[in-house]
Structures are given as C-alpha cells and as structure tokens.
Image (cartoon, rainbow, N blue to C red):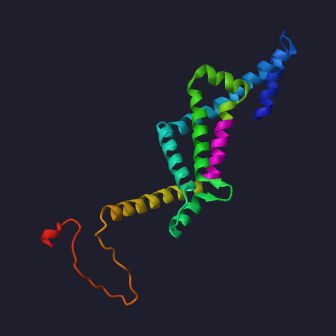
Amino acid sequence: MDITYISYTFLFIYLSFDITIFWKICSSIFIFNLFYFSTFAKKIQLDLSHFETAANQLEQYRSIFQKIESENFESKLLNQLQGKLVEGNYKASTAISKLSSYIDSLHTMLNLPIAVLFNGIFLFHVRKYLDLLKWKQSSNANFVEAFEVIGRVEALNSLANFSFNNPAYVFSEINERKMIQFQNLGHPLIPEKFE
C-alpha cells in the first residue's frame, strides 16, 4: 500500500470531523509523521545500541585527530600521514564531530515526550538518522584510513619515546651491501654489566 494513499486516507478521515480545517490538517500531519517515525524507530534503536558508550571515545578521537591535523611536522612520513586526515574539504576531526552530534541527537529519542513531540512535528529523529546513514556512506572509507593513521602515529610516538628515553641505544642502518655488522652488541633487557 502506498504511503501517500495512507496519508490521504487519514487526511480525509480527519477532515470529515467537525473541527477547524487547520487543526485537522495539523493533527493529520502529526499522526502521519508519528506513523512514519515508527517505521524507523527499531532501526534507530538498533544503531544507537552500537554507540551506547561511544560518546566519550568519539570526543577523545576527535581531539587526537584535531591535534594531528593542526601540528606542523618536519618529517615527510608524518606529513603524509597528516595529509590522509585532511584531504580537500574532508577533515577527520570534523567528520567525527558530525558523527558525535548525530548520535547525541538520536539519544534524545529515549525521552518519550520529546520523541513524540519532535517526530510528530518535524520528523526530527528520522532526519538525523538519514543524516547518519549519509555520513556512513560518505565518510566510511576515509574514516577507516583515519584510524589507521592514528595507529601509525601512535607506533611512531612509541618508537620516538623509546629513543628519547634511551639515548645510548643505537639503531641499525640498512646498507646496500646486504651485510650485517655488529660492534659492542647488547640486548636492551640485559644490564650493561653482564654484556
């Protein structure tokens, strides 16, 4: 059955009662919107269940993305990684902020009076859910790559921290002769007095 047919049926039924036409139209639209919202309610609740504890984590990731995006790196590798977070109009920190705002908006659905009022008048949660689906389609590939960038930056940060904390350690250099040569070889877990 076509959805417009249903809405016109409701409109006809309400207009046949003895109330002013304005209130009949408004109440028809309100009821139609609530029926339309009810078709999305379970889908929205299912998606929200995946994001139950994600609000704080999303904020933390946003600040990490923003820090990497705004930093001035001297390293070519770090500049390449930064370039993956900022491509054209896309910024990973902005994308995650949008995701966070969509989730926050959808969480208001848990307040029943607000959900009835907002969806009856504006179809608020349906619109936000459709925005979330558009976001998933447009940002999904970039978003996966953005999290890979965080992983690479964290790994590089760990190596830099290790190097800074252990200035006496020597890092191997790759040569073109495919030769391995050692001088004063030691192991990081064996104290120097036993080497």
| Farthest-out residue, right | 21
Between 142 and 48, which is closer to the camera in this rendering? 142
- When the figure is inspected, residue 168 is found, relative to residue 43, above or below; the finding is below
Q: Which of the 4 quarters of the picture holds residue 83?
A: bottom right
Q: Quadrant of the C terminus?
A: bottom left
Span highlighted in magenta in the image: 127-139
**At 41% across and 61% down in the image, what residue appears?**
155
Q: Is residue 67 left or right of residue 21?
A: left
- When the figure is inspected, residue 107 is found, relative to residue 185, above or below; the finding is above
- When the figure is inspected, residue 69 is found, relative to residue 188, above or below; the finding is above
In x, y percent, where is residue 140? 59, 53
Q: Is residue 53 magenta?
A: no
Chief secondary structure of the magenta portion? helix
In x, y percent, where is residue 93? 58, 49
**At 30% across and 64% down in the image, what residue appears?**
166
Q: Judge whether residue 175 can be spotted in this image.
A: yes
| Farthest-out residue, top | 18
| Farthest-out residue, bottom | 177
Q: Quadrant of the N terminus?
A: top right
Q: How many marks?
A: 0
Q: Is residue 3 left or right of residue 52?
A: right
Q: Which of the 4 quarters of the picture holds residue 194?
A: bottom left
In x, y percent, where is residue 145? 54, 59
**At 64% across and 29% down in the image, what residue appears?**
38
Between 20 and 72, which is closer to the camera in this rendering? 72
- When the figure is inspected, residue 2 is found, relative to residue 181, above or below; the finding is above
Q: Is residue 137 magenta?
A: yes
**At 80% across and 32% down in the image, what residue appears?**
4
In x, y percent, where is residue 151? 45, 58
| Farthest-out residue, left | 194
Q: Judge whether residue 34 can be spotted in this image.
A: no
